[in-house]
Image (cartoon, rainbow, N blue to C red):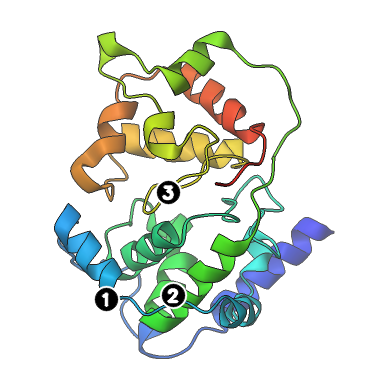
Amino acid sequence: MLKRTLISACTAAFIGLSGAALAGGHGEKPEANPWTNFALQNTLNKMPAGNAANGKELSDQWMCAACHGETGKSPSRNYASINGMPKEYTIKMMLDYRDGRRWENYKQANIMVKLAQSMNDQEIADLAAFYAEQPLTNWTDSTDVDPKIDRLVRKGDVNRMITPCASCHGVHGEGHGVVPSLAGQVPEYFVRTMKAYQDGQRHNDVNQGMSQFTHDLTDEEIQGLADYYAAMPAVKE
């Protein structure tokens, strides 16, 4: 019953969108230049300050909870958890959806694309501020830690030129700036994301960092990392 209600709410939110964003051709991909570090930082600096209270109202208005949960913790294994996500990262993702940098699978991402295209910069900043204020949460309570995966997270793999995950995403998976938090992420979403980078379907990462780091990871390692972060204790610095 819950799953059916969530799907209905997602559909209603999508149907309820209005304005020029929905007037364009179906699935027409906007053209946007890839990010450079300077261009991204310059864009973020120009974004308005976000208001978390307004962001909460927007999340209700756009029925974000139907897919991502009331506070950003996904109620489903189909969608990402975005609670505790750094505001800069959420802003970047929404701009990437809006401008066509994130378009790896339009059939799966069309709701996010249309939502982003319907929002102005202030609304995007407000939503990002709301989700950034929400606490990180565990997805699972497993205490089993694979030593090989733990080493990959903390030490990386010099032989394969794989940088430690913690060096960018934080020791506690808390993320920072445009680097997303990973602690408590839905494992299925984590795996899909890593495979999308690995297969070249997703390429909105600045300097193609994730595309490079995921290239030599095995399926077993990707699943191991997904399980590792899903159970990571919720700590946000």
Which residue is at the front of the view, 24 or 33?
A: 33
Q: Furthest-bottom residue in view?
A: 19
Q: First in sequence: mark 2 or mark 3?
A: 2
Quadrant housing the N terminus: bottom right
Looking at the rendering, which quadrant does residue 26 occupy?
bottom left
Q: Tell me the CA gap for discs 3 and 1.
A: 19 Å
Which residue is disc 3 drawn over? 176
Q: Which mark is residue 124?
A: 2
* Horizontal arrangement in the rendering, residue 225 relative to residue 179 (left or right): right
Between disc 2 and disc 3, the foreground one is 3
Task: Tell me: residue 148, above or below residue 222.
Answer: above
Task: Tell me: residue 174, above or below residue 4.
Answer: above
Q: Would residue 99 be seen by someone viewing this image from the given angle? A: no
Residue 19: image location, x then y, percent: 42, 91
Which residue is at the front of the view, 77 or 127?
A: 127
Residue 98: image location, x then y, percent: 34, 70
Which residue is disc 1 drawn over? 46
Task: Tell me: residue 71, above or below residue 188.
Answer: below
As helix, strand or loop, the secondary structure at mark 3 comes to: loop
Marks 2 and 3: CB-CB under 8 Å? no
Tell me the crowding category of disc 3: few under 14, some 14 to 19, or many 20 or more residues within 10 angstroms, Cα based: some
**How many marks on residues?**
3
As helix, strand or loop, the secondary structure at mark 1 comes to: helix
| Amino acid type at mark 3 | His
As helix, strand or loop, the secondary structure at mark 2 comes to: helix
| Amino acid type at mark 2 | Ile
Residue 229: image location, x then y, percent: 58, 32
| Amino acid type at mark 1 | Lys
* Horizontal arrangement in the rendering, residue 86 relative to residue 5 (left or right): left
Q: First in sequence: mark 3 or mark 1?
A: 1
The residue sitting at 27% across, 8% down in the picture is 159
